[in-house]
Every structure is written in structure tokens, then in C-alpha cells.
Amino acid sequence: MKRLLKLLLSRIGMVSLGILLQLFVLLASLLWFKDYKPVITTLSTILSWLLILYVLSLPENPAYKMAWIIPILGFPVLGLSLYLLFGGSRLSKRLRRKMGDIDKTLEETMVQNETVMEALRQDDPGAAVQARYLSNTVHCPVYQNTETDYYDSGERFFSRVFASLERAEKTIYLEYFIIEEGEIWSQILDILTRKAAQGVDVRLIYDDFGCIQRLPTRYERRLEALGIRARAFNRFVPILNSRLNNRDHRKLLLIDGVEGFTGGVNLADEYANLGKRRFGQWKDAAVRLRGEAVWSMTVMFLSMWNYVAQEQAVDQKPEFALLPKELGYVQPYLDTPLDDEAVGRIVFSNVITGARNYVWIMTPYLIIDEGMAETLTNAAKSGIDVRIITPGIPDKPYVYEMTRANYDPLLAGGVRIFEYSPGFVHSKVFLSDDITAAVGTVNLDFRSLYLHFEDGVWLYRADCIAAIRADFDASFPQCREVKLEESSRISVLRHLYRSILRLLSPLM
């Protein structure tokens, strides 16, 4: 009872109650006009069919459209109301207008060095096509002159982060979906406070919904008092609004404009396997860049900062020491719901279709549409060794069921699936042929691919790829391979449950 009362009185409880109250008022209003039921039914049916025609005409993922069409047809009044409130992956006109400067900033600030692009084309025309797509579509250049390091656990990631933060002299920029008070954040906050006192420009963006149960309300005010400039992204408020869909899922930690980190690791104890292990061993991954490619990550952060802080300045590009050219090619990229372009999905698809020998994947969620499933199975049927590592212990049971609901068609198509026995895999990593990789924040689910702000790094012959390969080689023996006979041997009710989850997964 105490836990329930605590939850209800918490910020997320109060906000959720506010949203539920608005839904109740909406339904009560419909019942109030019950005497006009024939008119309402006829009108709602006409409007529902018009809405369905509109939904079908949108440049959305077909699975996302179907997930909305079912409730609109089955429950015309409720389905129509919910779609008007939450439907569509695009931002509201007001938010799109306010954030319109982001794309302009990226286009003007991140300019492709054509000498680097031509060098990549000479090395591998297929890889150059991928790089050109990111350069043209989201204004994210491909770079040389950048060192890369890969971390196969949160423990190794934080060990390096602490040391790098201590060396900061000019700027520290952080942008995270989750920050939680605990041992990890306490150490980082101590460093940030000391650095701010030394005159280092320390700025932090955190997603308000991602931190709603992990940080006190208006936490940015506490940070400001410590000399840290902080902003909460897209504050979670008790108002029915499609903006609730769009979260800042990015994870960026940037130091002096020359060193940058990204990957799956958030700033919380569980990512370093500290405290209570709710999901067994937490396995995550991150990548560190040092060199010219960090400029792209810096502009990504500052363009978001300019929006949340209502500022317009972007730092001057620093001078970079020349590094060995054999470090390979590095291309940080972003994905946003601003442009109706599924950048993360296309990067993943290109890695798969470009494979000649193998493509190996780590992902916490495997909630994909038929197009991605077909891309994976087509590769497997062509003789490519396609393997996917998913969690052995789930963080969310219903999401785990959605993930497993996608096993059968993949297994039948020749894709091999491995569940990580020690615990939960939170890594978002693609590796192909020992030469191409993608590491970042993008999950294989609809929210990451279509609704959230995300980031990643595409790597070609980068010096960290050997470490990524070693991570996979060490992980497979710790996994249990799932076979088709086992996956398909479930009860009728469980099969029905998974079918419903697959249908509605784009909305969850």
C-alpha cells in the first residue's frame, strides 16, 4: 500500500493521473451524447474512413499504418480520438517550426571534405555509397584522422570516461536519455562541479521522461547552482499531446571538442553492474572517438542545446593534430523525427545488404517490420552468416514477448538467434566482414527507428573494429542458440498473444 501511495504521489504518478483524467473526460463526453448515438456513429464512421485514407497516404512505415488502422476500424470514436492526439511519427507544427534551425545549422556547419569521400570511393565504392547517403541526407560527413576505441562493457566505458573528464580544459558537453542518482552519477557530478569551478564550460541535456523516476523534479536548477548549465528535453507534462512520443534517446559525452563518446550506456549504476542486478549481468557497448569526427558530434549537441536553451551560437571548429591515415573512416550520424527519414534503419539495412561473408548484430529489442525481416532473411538465404544476439533476461516482459514473436520468420529464413544467458544485452552494434560496423543508441524497435532523437557512428576499416569482432567472439559462447523447433513450440494462446503484440508493436 505504501509503494502504491508513493507511486501515485510521485511526479510520474501525478502526470499519469492527469492524462488518465483527460481520457476519462473524453470518454464521458462521448457518453453524454448517447442520445445522439446514431448520428455520432454515422459521423465517426465517415471520419474514420477518411482518416484511414489519410493514414494510408502518409509516408509512414506500413506496419505503423496498420497498427493504427485496426483500432480506428474496431473502435471508431476512441480510435479516431487517440490518433488525433498521438498518431503520426512527426512532430507538431509548433515544435517542428521551433526546431527547424537544427537542420540548417547542420547543413551550414558540417561540410563534407570531398578528398576524404573520394579516397573512400577509391577504397570501396559500396562503402562510399553509404557514406554519401549520410552526408547528403543528414549533413553528416565521413572523416579520416580519427582514432576509435570500443568498450564492451559499462565498467570499461566509465573507467575511461572518468579519466577523460579529469583532463578537460575547455568544454564538457553531455546529452543523455537516462541519468540516475547513484555511485556513477555521484562521481561524474563531482568532476563536473570541480571543472565548472575551474572555468570549464559544462553543459548537460537530459530527457525529462527518461529521468522522471530517477532524478528530482526540476533537477536542472540544482545543477545550475553548481555552475553546470543544464536543460531538460521535452518536459513530461499531464497534457494529451503527440509530443510525448518524441524523446531524446541520444547519449553523447564530448570533451574539449576533440574527444567524444557514444553508445548504449546511460549514466546510471546498473549500466556498470553496480547495486542490485535486476536483469542479471548487464552487457552494453560504447565507442570513443578522438580527432576530426568529434566535430560532428559537437555540432549535434550544440544544435540541440540551441533549441532547449534558446541560443544560437555554435563553437568554432578546433584544430586537430594529424593522425595516421590507416585509422580508417569514421562517420557520426544522427536520426531525428524532423525529416521523415528513417536514417538509423537505412544504415542498418545497408550494413546487411553490403555484407559478403557475415553480419552480426547485438540488440536489446528485436521489434522489426516485414521489410527489415526480409532484408535479414534474404541475406541469410544468400549464404551470409547472419546472427543476432538478444537478451537472455528481459528488462520488460511484454517487450521480450514482442522480440520473441519475431523469431520464427527469421529462424525459418536461416537467421541464427542467440540469447545472452548471463543477463540483459543493451548493446546496439552491427558488424560486417571485419571491415564495417555501426555503434550507437538506435534500437531495433519502432520508437528508436521512427520517433526518437538518436545518434550513432558508422565505421569502415576503423581501428576499433577488431575489438568489436573480439566482443562478438567472446559473447557467442555465453549465449544459448534458439532453434526454430523450440521457438515455434508454444501454446495457441501464447501464439495469439504474440500475434497481437506484433500487430500493435509500432504503437508501444
Image (spheres, rainbow, N blue to C red):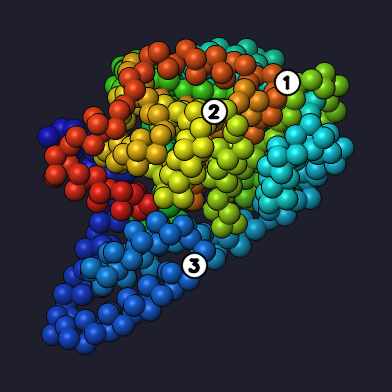
Q: Quadrant of residue 377?
A: top left
Q: Which residue is mark 1?
A: 147
Q: Sequence order check: which comes first, mark 3 or mark 2?
A: 3
- Residue 162 in the image: state x and y as whole percent: 58, 15
- Residue 390 in the image: state x and y as whole percent: 38, 28
Q: In the drawing, does residue 447 fall left or right of residue 315?
A: left
Q: Amino acid at mark 2?
A: Tyr
- SS state under label 3: loop
Q: Amino acid at mark 3?
A: Leu
- Between 27 and 383, the residue placed more toward the observer is 383
Distance of mark 1 from mark 2, alpha carbons? 25 Å
Q: In the drawing, does residue 389 fall left or right of residue 170?
A: left
Give yes or no for contact between labels 1 and 2 (Cβ–Cβ under 8 Å): no
Q: In the drawing, does residue 321 fall left or right of residue 412?
A: right
Q: Amino acid at mark 1?
A: Glu
- Between 143 and 1, the residue placed more toward the observer is 143
- SS state under label 1: strand
Q: Which residue is mark 3?
A: 58
- Residue 127 in the image: state x and y as whole percent: 70, 37
Distance of mark 3 from mark 1, alpha carbons? 42 Å
Please report the residue visible at 68 percent of the width from the left and 51 percent of the height from the top.
Answer: 137
Q: Sequence order check: which comes first, mark 3 or mark 1?
A: 3
